[in-house]
């Protein structure tokens, strides 16, 4: 491990020199590539340098303690040795995690899709709750959000909503949210007080860059239609809504959120690229189960990754067995405890496989 870390440290130094080189700076594409590579190494290199500095400090303290001179100085040195060894153990664990293979999508923005599943209007209301929960979570991280497409019900529910989330660490923190979310609560229309169970599905896709997915104009069919729902006379009477079909895969994306046909087309293409990338990655990882099927499932109540129980104010993530009794806070975007738990669990599983 130390040899590998030393090599990464040397690479980091070379990249530091490159990003300061005027010739490299003149080529922005090349400069950005080196800046990104350097940023990816920074955390592990800083931890490695802290590890080396701690080792050296322990060595100095051991030399002082071995002299058996001033008793107070010896005692201080022994205290430093003990604290240093404890820090070394912590740094070793940190370095093991930092050396785990990175998910190549972790640095990307997110296309987040929420759809109502089993449960009719109550499922649509819950899908709306989830959509707003992720909006709040993004706001707390100061990530930029943009509505790509939405189909709202008359009473504030969501049949389907697609949102772009842009910001550092967006995919790395949200990727475990994919799956079926189940809700248990008493609907406002339920006079007998009976608890109903409904579901909504969440899919988290890394946003594809144009260079990753090249879509030929010959491979798509574009249909224009009038937008539906609220939005004013202009939206509902002009063909501003766009539906794009990717002919090789059959993937269909529609967008009607903007009044401008050009803007709707641009948004739809961003979503399409991400879905095509996902399909390409699924096919490349043929040994694994289909990512989207495992993500979304059928929307049936029995398939779930998390349950939100309103009568008990309880949220349970079934993958890691975590139960929290603060449902209101979680729906306001306080997801850190759950997401941190999922990330820690993923790291632990990957360490076992190393």
Image (cartoon, helix red, strand yellow):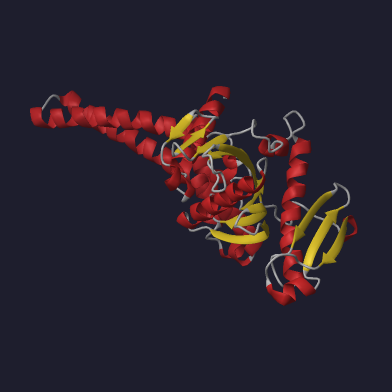
Q: Position of residue 114 (x, y in %)?
A: 64, 49
Residue 342: % across, % down: 51, 35
Q: Nearer the viewer, residue 182 or 240?
A: 182
Q: Is residue 239 at all visible to an observer of this figure?
A: yes
For image coordinates 77% across by 43% down, the residue present is 279
Q: Is residue 185 above or below residue 211?
A: above
Q: Which image quarter: residue 54? A: top left
Reply above or below: 303 against 225: above
Across and down, in percent, residue 223 comes to 86, 63
Q: Is residue 275 left or right of residue 13?
A: right
Rendered image quadrant of residue 26: bottom right
Expressed as whole percent of the image width and height from the top left, the position of residue 127 reads: 61, 48
Determine the residue located farthest toward the right in the rendered image: 218
* Total marks in image: 0
Q: Residue drawn 67% across and 38% down?
A: 295
Q: Is residue 70 visible?
A: no
The quarter of the image holding the C terminus is top right
Q: Nearer the viewer, residue 301 or 47?
A: 301
Residue that lies at the very extreme toward the front in this rendered image? 191
């Amino acid at each position: 491990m130390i040899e590998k870390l030393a090599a990464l440290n040397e690479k980091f130094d070379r990249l530091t020199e490159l990003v300061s080189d005027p010739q490299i700076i003149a080529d922005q594409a090349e400069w950005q590539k080196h800046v990104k590579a350097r940023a990816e190494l920074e955390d592990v290199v800083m931890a490695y340098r802290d590890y080396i500095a701690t080792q050296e400090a322990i060595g100095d303290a051991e030399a002082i303690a071995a002299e058996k001179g001033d008793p107070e100085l010896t005692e201080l040195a022994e205290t430093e040795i003990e604290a240093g060894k404890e820090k070394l153990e912590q740094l070793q664990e940190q370095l093991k995690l930092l050396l785990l293979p990175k998910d190549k999508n972790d640095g990307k923005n997110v296309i987040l899709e929420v759809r109502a599943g089993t449960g009719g209007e109550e499922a649509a209301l819950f899908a709306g709750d989830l959509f707003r929960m992720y909006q709040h979570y993004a706001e707390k991280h100061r990530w930029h959000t943009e509505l790509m497409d939405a189909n709202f019900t008359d009473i504030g529910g969501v049949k389907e909503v697609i949102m772009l989330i842009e910001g550092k660490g967006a995919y790395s923190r949200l990727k475990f949210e994919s799956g079926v979310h189940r809700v248990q609560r008493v609907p406002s229309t339920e006079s007998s007080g009976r608890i109903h169970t409904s579901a909504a599905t969440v899919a988290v896709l890394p946003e594809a860059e144009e260079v990753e997915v090249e879509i030929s104009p010959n491979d798509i069919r574009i249909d224009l239609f009038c937008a539906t729902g609220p939005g004013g006379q202009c939206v509902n009477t002009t063909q501003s809504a766009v539906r794009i079909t990717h002919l090789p895969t059959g993937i269909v994306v529609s967008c009607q959120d903007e009044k401008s046909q050009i803007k709707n087309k641009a948004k739809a293409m961003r979503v399409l690229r991400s879905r095509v990338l996902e399909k390409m990655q699924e096919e490349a990882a043929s040994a694994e189960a289909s990512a989207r099927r495992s993500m979304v499932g059928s929307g049936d109540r029995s398939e779930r990754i998390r349950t939100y129980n309103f009568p008990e104010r309880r949220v349970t993530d079934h993958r890691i067995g975590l139960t929290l009794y603060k449902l209101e806070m979680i729906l306001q975007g306080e997801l850190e405890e759950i997401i941190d738990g999922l990330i820690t669990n993923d790291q632990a599983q990957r360490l076992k496989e190393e």
